Every structure is written in C-alpha cells, then in structure tokens.
Image (cartoon, rainbow, N blue to C red):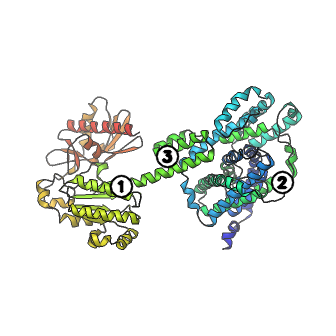
Amino acid sequence: MVERLFPFLKWFRGYNREFLTSDFLAGLTVAVVLVPQSMAYAMLAGLPPVHGLYAGAIASAVAALWGSSPQLQTGPVAIVSFLVFTSLMTFAQPESPQFLLLASALALMAGIFQLFLGAFKLGFIMNFVSHAVVSGFSNAAAIIIASTQVPHLLGIEIEKHEFVFKNFAEIAKNAVYTNPYTAAIGFASLVLIILLKRIHNAFPSALAVVVLSTLATYYLNLEEKGVKVVGDIPAGLPTPTLPLIDMDMVDELLGKAIVIAIIGFMEAYAIAKTISVQTKQKLDVDQELIGQGLANIVVSFFKGYPVSGSFSRSAVNFIAGAKTGMSSVFTTLFVLITLFFFAPLLYYLPRATLAAIVILAVIGIVKPARFLSLYKTNRQDGIIALITFFSSFIMKPDYAIFIGVVLSLILFLWRSMYPRIVHLSRDPETRTFVNAQTFGIPECPQILFIRPDASLYFANAEHIFEEIDRLVKSKGKELKYLVIDGESINYIDATAVEVFKDFLEELERRNVELYMVNVKLPVKEVLYRAGIINVIGEDRLIASKGQTISLLFKKLDHDYCKRDCPYAVFDECASVKEILKLEAVDKGFLRKLYQHLSALPGVEVFIGHRDERILIMVGGTAFRFDIKDFSKDGEGRFYVSPTKVLEINGHIISVGRVAKELGIPSVNGHPVLGSSLKEVADRLRAIVEHSLSESLKEG
C-alpha cells in the first residue's frame, strides 16, 4: 500500500553510488536541453517564455516520482503547447494575465482528468484514440506549429486567426515587413543548431545557440534595431496559487482540457513504451496516468501550463544513462538553480532563436511516409489519418481530433457489424480445417461448416444470421447439416439470442440440423439460460471439428456420396467410394520442369540446391515452389498443393484460389496441372501471372 502511494520508494532498493552518479549526470544533461526547449514551447503556447521554465522545473520531478517509467522526461512539449494556444486564443490575448490564468486552469483540469482515470484504473479508455488519429494530427500539428513560429523568425506582426489557413495568408501578406536583423538571427540559429548537431547528436546545440544569440544581441544592440527579446525574467518560482476561474469558463474549457489530457498522455505513454522495450522495465498505464496527472495539477499552482512526456528529452535521459527517476529530480534541481540564479541573464535572448528551436524540434514529427505505411497496412487507418490531417487545417485542432476518433470508432463498429463468415473445409494435405474460399478447397455438399469471425451482439446479429441463412439457401436440397464453429464467438447478448431463436425455426422448416463446435463457456452459459440448448439438443454441442465430422459422416447420404459428389473432402470419404491416391513426385521432377519453363517467353527460371526448389520470375517478381508442393497420381497426372501460398508485394495469395478462378480442374481439392511437363509449365505460368495481376489490383 505504501509503495502504491509512493511508488518512488522502489528506486532505492539496491540504489548505489554508481546509480547516483548516472542519474546526476543524466539529470544535468537533460536540464541543458530542457531550459531552451521549455522557453521556446511556452512562447508557442502563447505564454511568456519563463512560464515554460516554471512548468519544466516542477513537472519533471513530480511525474517521475509518481509515474512508472524511470526514463520518461515530462515538461513542455510542442503538440500540447500548440493545443493550449489554439484552445485559448479565442478567450484571451496571448501573454495577457487572463491567458496565463486560463493556461494554468487547463493544466489543472487536464491533470484532474488524468488523475481520475489513473486512480480508478480507467487507463484502457486511452485505447479509443487510435494510432491513425494521433499520427494524422501530429503531422498536421507539426506543420502548423512551424508556421506559427515564422512571424517570430522574421520579426513580423500578423493578425492571429482561429483557422490556420488564414494565418498562412497573413504571413504571406506581411512577409514584406520582415526585420532583416531578426531574420538574420533566426536563420543563423537554424543553421547553427543543425551544424552543431552534426558534431554529436548529444551535443547541447540549442543551449549553445541560446548563449551565442544572447551575447550577439547584447553586444550588437540588436534590441534597438527591432529584434524582440525575452525581456525581464523574475528570479525564482512564483508563489503557489490555485488557478480559479468561473464555472462558465470551466464549461467552455473542459472539453479542450480532456483533449489535451488524452493527446498529451498518449504521447507520453508511447515514449515510455518505446524506452521500456529496450530496458525491459514494466510499465503501468494507470500509474503513469497518476504521475502525469499530478504533474499537471502541481504545475498549475506555479503558473505553468499543461505538460507531457518529451520524446527528445526522454531519449537524451536514456542515452545519458539514467537508472531511476532520480535523474528527473536532478533535472528539476538544475532548472530551479537556473531560475533562481541565472534567469536575469536571459533578458537578451532573441525570440527568433526560440522560434528556430521550435521549428527544428517539430520538423522531425512530419513523416509523410507514415500515411503510405498506414494505408498499406490497413486502408481504413490510412484514410482516418489523412482525414484527421486535412481536418486540422480547416477547423479547430480539437475538432479534428474528435472527428478522427469518432470516425475510427464508427469504422470499428462497422467492421464488427459485418464480420467475415469463414467457410471451413479439410486441407487435403495437412488434414486440418482451413478457409475453403481462400485456398480454393471444395466443401462437402451435405455439410455447411462455417465460422463467424466475431462475437454476436445487437448490432451484428441480424446481419450474421441473414448471411448464414443465405448460405444455407445457396446450398440447395443436398444440404443436411449446418455446423457453426464458435471459436471466434466470445460473447452473445440478448438481442443475438432472440435472432438466433428465429433462425432455428427457419432451419427446422428447411430440414437442416444445427451442430455447434468449440462453443466457449460464457457463450454456452447464455445459451443454456436462454433455453437454446434445449432446442438444439445438448448432444449437438461437440468439442472438436474432427469429432463433429466423424459423427456427421455416419449420417450422410452415402449413396449421394458415391453417385453424385465429385469430391473427397474428408478422410472418411475413402470408406464409401474410391478416391484418387496421390504420391510425391520424383526427385528429378523440378529439373525437367525447369527445362520446359525456360523455353517459355517472358519467364526466367532458377533452380535451387539439390533440385529441391524452383524460382519462377515473371514481371520482375519471383515465385518460389518447393518439390513438396507437387504430387502425382497413378495415371501420370501432376498436381499442385491448393494451400501453397505466394507472397507478392505484401499480399498472400493461395494457389488453390487462383486455380479455381482460372477454371483449372481439381481432384480431391488438388488443382490438376496436366499429364505432360509442357502442360504443367503452361499452367504454372498462368497461375503466377494471374497471382501477380491480382496482387496489383489489391495493391
């Protein structure tokens, strides 16, 4: 219980001088990065730069003391600072006392929300904001953030608008009024930071440029030439006060605070997870919420604004060798020393330099290739990311995030409403049950064996049972048994139960018997309570697929099997009719096939070691076949395995499905390649060409 309230006590188990030295040096290294960054991000948030130091000094220690990640560095960050600015710009003038009060109030509300979620173990709620939404918004925010710093970089004044595209127009209109001294300082800062980073990635380039630009402004009297500087920075921390605002304003800001809390935490937790993968340290999402929440709450008392985990500073902390959260405590101490003893020295720090620091920090967030990667992985995620990205430019950022979240949830519900109904059949080689349609494997005409790939609930039950009913009708009069595999059904609600009852009546009218296999205990309990088991019969709930087929095969119309059924789907088929026996091809088969394939135009062929594999190159794509993929019968015909899969440009295509689409006949589910090697070569070429064509369509 004590460690739950004070999780930092775990640090001191086995804490030694080596850990202390590592944490001290890491804390100092991070402080060197934090000081210029926190001032720059405060300016981005519409606050005087010193308020970034207030937030950074307090948040670093508090978040580490009550969080779960030893290396996570918390403080001002670009995305959250941008959200603060866009959330408050319609309520108060940036850098005004009212703006400062509202920023602190946002931190307090965001912190309370995070603390509430963590204390009541509701961290799972964060999963409702998909990675696609965060990726789309982050890319857009980075571009928008960079654009907000251009006026500071050029030394121009613009009228700030709520919508970003209007700000772009303002920058273009006022670019002619650029202050050459400000622009020189700004672009020189950009170049110097980039060059100094090339010396060593851990070199404190931002701090070095802060020092150099401050000295240049002081000795060259650039303030008198229109270069805007940070100005007076009071020494020390402000007196702790509770940021009180009226309830009407709380109502206005609550939604924005929740968005900031969620986006800020997702950024922090993603960073913590990235580091924990390398350190093998365990993360606790609820404890991390408590740490981030307390950091925001305490920061609000010291005229700070919302904070989050910083990727760049956490990486510096990790690389510098931080062992425990004490490194963050040392960071706080060093920033406090800066505030108490060195703050006045920052009077002549040019704001253009801080703008350069922000621009270079957010450029790394822009990753256009991420959209393509998301689209290739999952088209819906790619579309959501793009919609969130473009929405961020034409509306308020929190609205764009809301649209992305709602859209991703709608698409998730849509997928759950229309799940796959998988047709199952026995693989003629492995004897396991596989997707018959994917591999082009025949199904027994008297048994419809299916697996709904979803739980059954009010939104999808009607569609699923309608689709099953359609499949039952399509089978015709030969169908005698419907087998539903419950392997993917984890849950069934009352609505689904009622739809199920109606479906059972329809099956009875069609004289089709229902059997269920792999029914999970929670689902079985619901079916018992609803009386469905009594209707079906407990003997029709069977433990395994193989056991189900063994039982049903005895009940099939064996005369139909002998006379009309062209397939041998099950092992049991051999007991009622003569089936074709297949055997492995001769060892020299691929060498002979190689000669015939080599004679085909547009085909390159390579044969592998010991003649056990062959590569067929068509259209610049290689297709590999192994000798075990082929078989032959006693009449001299050659076959290819229907479950052989070809991987093309990230797509997986089965040979059985392609052969079926091409109209190639099959025996016992095996596509027939022909009796001569020339026929085999021609059909293999047709299969690989069709597979390539299909992959291009899907891609």
Q: Estimate the spatial distance between the alpha carbons at disc 3 and disc 2, rounded to whole Å.
A: 46 Å
What residue do we see at 83% from left, 51% from top?
A: 338
In the rendered image of this protein, does residue 144 appear above or below residue 522?
A: above
Q: Earlier in the sequence, mark 3 or mark 1?
A: 3
Nearer to us of marks 3 and 2 is 3
Q: Which mark is residue 381?
A: 3
Label 1: state its secondary structure: helix
Q: Residue at x 41, y 54 (%)?
A: 417
Crowding around mark 3 (Cα neighbors within 10 Å: few <14, some 14 to 19, many 20+) is many
Could you classify mark 2 by the number of other residues whose Cα lies within 10 Å: few (under 14), some (14-19), or many (20 or more)? Answer: some
Location of residue 126 (image quadrant): bottom right
* In front of the other: 225 or 460: 460
Which badge, 3 or 2, is on the more N-terminal residue? 2
Residue on which disc 1 sits: 463
Q: Is residue 514 left or right of residue 287?
A: left
Q: Quadrant of the N terminus?
A: bottom right
Camera-side residue: 55 or 527? 527
Amino acid carrying label 1: it is His
Badge number at residue 337: 2
* Residue 116 visible, this orientation: yes
